[in-house]
Structures are given as structure tokens and as C-alpha cells.
Image (cartoon, rainbow, N blue to C red):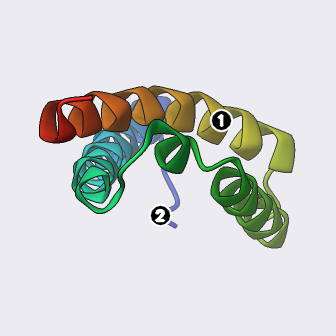
Amino acid sequence: MKECNSLAEVRDEIDQLDDQIVELIAKRNKYIKQAARFKNTIDEVKAPDRIDAVIQRLRRKALDLDLSPNLVADLYKLMIDEMVETEIAELRNAKDL
């Protein structure tokens, strides 16, 4: 991590990180759309066991990085909820459900 010498520099670094985060979320969303090709039902898309496993894995990762596991879990729950809706739409389009 870079040691910044001014608030402007800190903000610039944060802006760059935010851009990368959005790019990674977009990349994740593209994989979510691909996943719909391998599923046949909305229940397969919702996959609560898979979602729980993802959240638990990321909570542990957050702890390892000295980050609030609740923050990470809350962010991912919101993101996953939205992406599940995207995947359901993809499934419906592909399978005429």
C-alpha cells in the first residue's frame, strides 16, 4: 500500500481502487450471466447453500485481512441478491421460463 502525502493523494488512490472494484463487480456479473447456461430452474439459481458458503468464506477472508466480516457479508448479500435477479432473467431468456 502506498504511503500518501496529502488528502488529495489519498482520495486519488481511493478513486482508483473504487474504479477497480466496479470493474471487478462487472466481471463477476458477466460470470453470473454465464452460470445461467448451466442451470435449469430458478431454484438452482437461488442456491441458498452456495450463497451461504460464499458469504461464510468471505467472512473468514475479511477476518484474515482485519476487515469487518459484517461489512463484507452485508455488501455481498446485497450484490448477490441483485446478481441472482440478473441470473434469473438470463435463465428465463435462455430457457423460455
The residue under the point 51% across, 50% down is 44
| The one of 68 and 82 positioned closer to us in this rendering | 82
Residue carrying label 2:
2
The tag on residue 46 is: none
The correct choice, above or below, for 64 with respect to 71 in the image is: below
The correct choice, above or below, for 44 with respect to 60 in the image is: above
- Quarter of image, res 13: top left
| The one of 73 and 10 positioned closer to us in this rendering | 73
Q: Residues within 10 Å of mark 2 (few under 14, many from 20)?
A: few
Of badges 2 and 1, nearer the viewer stands: 1
From mark 2 to mark 1, how far is it between C-alphas?
Answer: 30 Å
User: Is 71 situated left or right of 41 in this image?
Assistant: right
Residue carrying label 1:
77
| The one of 54 and 6 positioned closer to us in this rendering | 54
Spot occupied by residue 77 in the image (x, y as percentages of width and height): 65, 35
The residue under the point 78% across, 54% down is 67
Q: Work out whether residue 47 can be spotted.
A: yes
Which amino acid, mark 1?
Answer: Lys
The correct choice, above or below, for 92 with respect to 36 in the image is: above
The residue under the point 14% across, 41% down is 94
Q: Secondary structure at mark 1?
A: helix
| The one of 54 and 36 positioned closer to us in this rendering | 36
Q: Residues within 10 Å of mark 1 (few under 14, many from 20)?
A: some
Spot occupied by residue 2 in the image (x, y as percentages of width and height): 47, 63
The residue under the point 38% across, 38% down is 18
Which amino acid, mark 2?
Answer: Lys
